[in-house]
Image: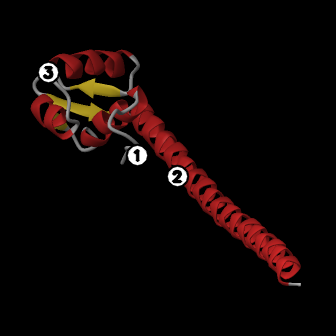
């Protein structure tokens, strides 16, 4: 499971997608389609994760996540989860800040209108006397 935050994925998100697909064994084509990668990009990433020992190849057609790869994926998913929690707290804080700014702005506008109204009363009051 990876977190997709925007139109573009990070390298870590792509690696997580590849490893997730290969958890129970997967052919190259399945990994390519499910990870939404071109053949060229998949080859590049497969080379990297194979060299890093995160993935193994059975010599025929199946890619499997290694123990090291599963630990990496678990750690990465934990990181993504913490990031989502941080993002939620940050967004909640931002929404509260925006609400407070609206209250302050409304209060300032109200004071300004009252001041204008009071000034108008003083001006009108002076003309009628």
Q: Could you tell me if the residues under marks 1 and 2 are in contact, i.e. CB atoms within 8 Å? A: yes
Give the colour scheme shown.
Answer: secondary structure
Identity of the residue drawn at 83% across and 77% down:
127
Identity of the residue drawn at 51% across and 41% down:
75
* Secondary element at image label 2: helix
Label 3 belongs to which residue?
Answer: 39
Label 2 belongs to which residue?
Answer: 84
* Secondary element at image label 3: helix
Q: Position of residue 56 (x, y in %)?
A: 28, 26
Q: For this rendering, which residue is in front, 90 or 80?
A: 90
* Mark 2 or mark 3, whichever is nearer to me: 2
Quadrant of image for the C terminus:
bottom right
Label 1 belongs to which residue?
Answer: 3
Vertical comparison of 50 with 90: above or below: above
Distance from disc 1 to disc 2, alpha carbons, whole Å, reads 8 Å
Q: Position of residue 1 (x, y in %)?
A: 36, 48
Q: Could you tell me if the residues under marks 2 and 3 are in contact, i.e. CB atoms within 8 Å? A: no
How crowded is the residue under tag 1: few (<14 C-alpha within 10 Å), some, or many (20+)?
some
């Amino acid at each position: 499971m990876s977190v997709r935050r925007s139109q573009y994925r990070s390298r870590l998100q792509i690696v997580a997608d590849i490893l997730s697909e290969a958890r129970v064994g997967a052919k190259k084509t399945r990994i390519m389609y499910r990870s939404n990668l071109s053949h060229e990009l998949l080859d590049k990433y497969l080379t990297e994760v194979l060299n890093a020992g995160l993935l193994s190849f059975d010599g025929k057609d199946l890619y499997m996540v290694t123990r090291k790869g599963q630990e990496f994926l678990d750690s990465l998913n934990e990181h993504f989860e913490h990031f989502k929690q941080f993002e939620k707290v940050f967004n909640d804080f931002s929404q509260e800040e925006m609400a407070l700014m609206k209250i302050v702005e409304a209060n300032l506008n109200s004071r300004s209108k009252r001041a204008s109204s009071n000034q108008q009363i003083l001006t009108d009051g002076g003309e009628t006397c």
